[in-house]
Amino acid sequence: IEIWTEATEKVTDAMKAGLKDEKFNSLDMMVGSGARGNMMQVRQIAGMRGLVANPKGDIIPRPIKSNFREGLSVLEYFISTHGARKGLADTALRTADSGYLTRRLVDVSQDVIIREDDCGTERGMPKVIGVRGEDGVVRKDDNVETSAYARSSAVDVAHPKTGEVLVAAGADLGDVQIDELVAAGVEEVKVRSVLTCDAKTGTCAKCYGRSLATGKLVDIGEAVGTIAAQSIGEPGTQLTMRTFHTGGVAGDDITQGLPRVVELFEARTPKGVSPIAEASGRVTIEETDKARRILLTPDDGSDEHAYPVSKRARLLVEDGQHVEVGTQLTVGAIDPKQVLRILGPRAVQMHLVDEVQNVYRQQGVSIHDKHIEVIVRQMLRRITIIESGDADLLPGELAERGRFEEENRKVVAEGGRPASGRPELMGITKASLATDSWLSAASFQETTRVLTEAAMHAKSDPLLGLKENVILGKLIPAGTGLSRYRNVIVEPTEEAKAAMYTLPTYDQYDYGMFGSGTGTGEAIRLDDTELGLDRF
């Protein structure tokens, strides 16, 4: 399979060279200008079709040597019908799957609304804006438009050499500022993010940054959760459904496209999961006839960790190599729950954002990181209480992060012992059903179970999200429906009042338009006077 893939690439290169020789080739111009099509399609028309997959998704080792221009043989034509039919079947199924993903995303993020101007946090997420080339010059990163652009800086960004502050903390990062920073040689900036926002409910405008719809700082009351869900769900139909099997290794299924996005947002353990190092230490690889194990001896002298891996798995570490904590040991997808357990919440947030972005970028879809961050924030908003300390929390309880932090602040202020907890990563469906609002959860899925539990626990609904207010027929708490905008009374200023109530005096009227002798107080006969109507 690898040999044939290489052969196809060589044929493609030869074809590209042939196209370049011709000055005005219509196909080359169409692809080159980006008007229609890509090199893959030209390859099939003029080069060779190469390897195709069968209905199961395995690659058929017999390649199609012909192209569409020469015409396919009967066998080749028959082999390629699989792919064509799969394409049409996929399109029909994809629409439904993508629609359901959008619904779950909206449900989990509908209560993320901009509720304040600035939460005042100094925390942030590091984002790469420049890449240092081999010549030592820093150039703008390809993905800066979807990572650092349209956000607020979390800290002062100084010039690496002079120390002069180029961008102040809280300042907006636009094209001009990013270009300035890259020109100065700055490679990474720390930006405000909804993942680090300290707002009690919803999020604050500074942490969200600019609205990508208007280009201005986002307004208070903007339903950014729903916007994020739609921004991720809408391009979902463009993602491929297929589970690709990459050439070479048979056991190396890499889930891509829409199923991969769903797998990440539902926080599922991926198929063929790759282990990660639980501690820094030295690796030894043990091989027997049937199995293979990776043994990790930690530097701190604690018990060694054993990771059984299949014989077919491709290793990313060598025997005797020293690895850092969190290093991936074999080729494959990582389980986000393990990342959370070993490396902590910040690492899992960055992992999820990067992985979702990878899927969309492979399909040429550009989505801003901040939309994905809004969803990831909702997946990590609960904490399992381990020890309650003096706080009003129960061990084993799933508490909202906001409530957990507030209780701890209160206890610490009174000199008590704070509660300790472990952050939980929940899939979007589970997170939607675990929300404080039983109305929202019941209208999503498993209505009977949700209502029964709500009745058993005598739950009350705080009505913070959009759905629960719609169900009750109330105004939604977004946009002008926010309580701060509800009872706005417009009071005129003193100048406005003065301008409103002044009446013109006798002298200010223009009596001259009624002809001569007016304005003197004499009575005049109208028939003797030109009324000056010709002016009108």
Image (tube, rainbow, N blue to C red):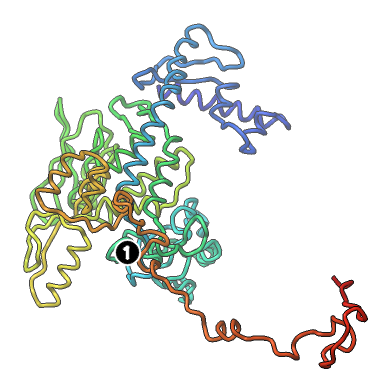
**Residue 496 in which image quadrant:** bottom right
Query: What residue is disc 1 on?
Result: 197
Q: Is residue 333 above or below residue 65?
A: below
Whole-percent x, y for residue 509 in the image: 76, 85
Q: For residue 267, what is the image quadrant?
A: top left
Q: 217 or 12: nearer the eye? A: 217
Name the residue at 42% across, 67% down: 153
Question: Residue, x 60% and y 21% (percent of image)?
Answer: 46
| For residue 150, above or below residue 155 | above
**Disc 1 crowd, CA 10 A, few/some/many (<14, 14-19, 20+):** many
Q: Position of residue 35 (x, y in %)?
A: 63, 36
Give, as a three-letter code, the residue at label 1: Cys
Residue located at (55% from left, 26% from top) = 41
* Residue at image point 41% right, 51% down: 227
Q: Is any part of residue 351 visible from this angle?
A: no
Q: Is residue 284 left or right of residue 394?
A: right
* Position of residue 280 measured from the top left corner of the image (x, y, whole percent): 19, 53
Query: Residue lying furthest right in this view?
Result: 528
The quadrant the C terminus occupies is bottom right
Compared across the picture, whether 395 is left or right of 468 comes to left
Quarter of the rendering containing residue 32: top right
Q: How many numbered discs? A: 1
Would residue 213 be found to the left or right of residue 486 on screen?
right
Examine the rendering and report whether any part of residue 107 can be seen: yes
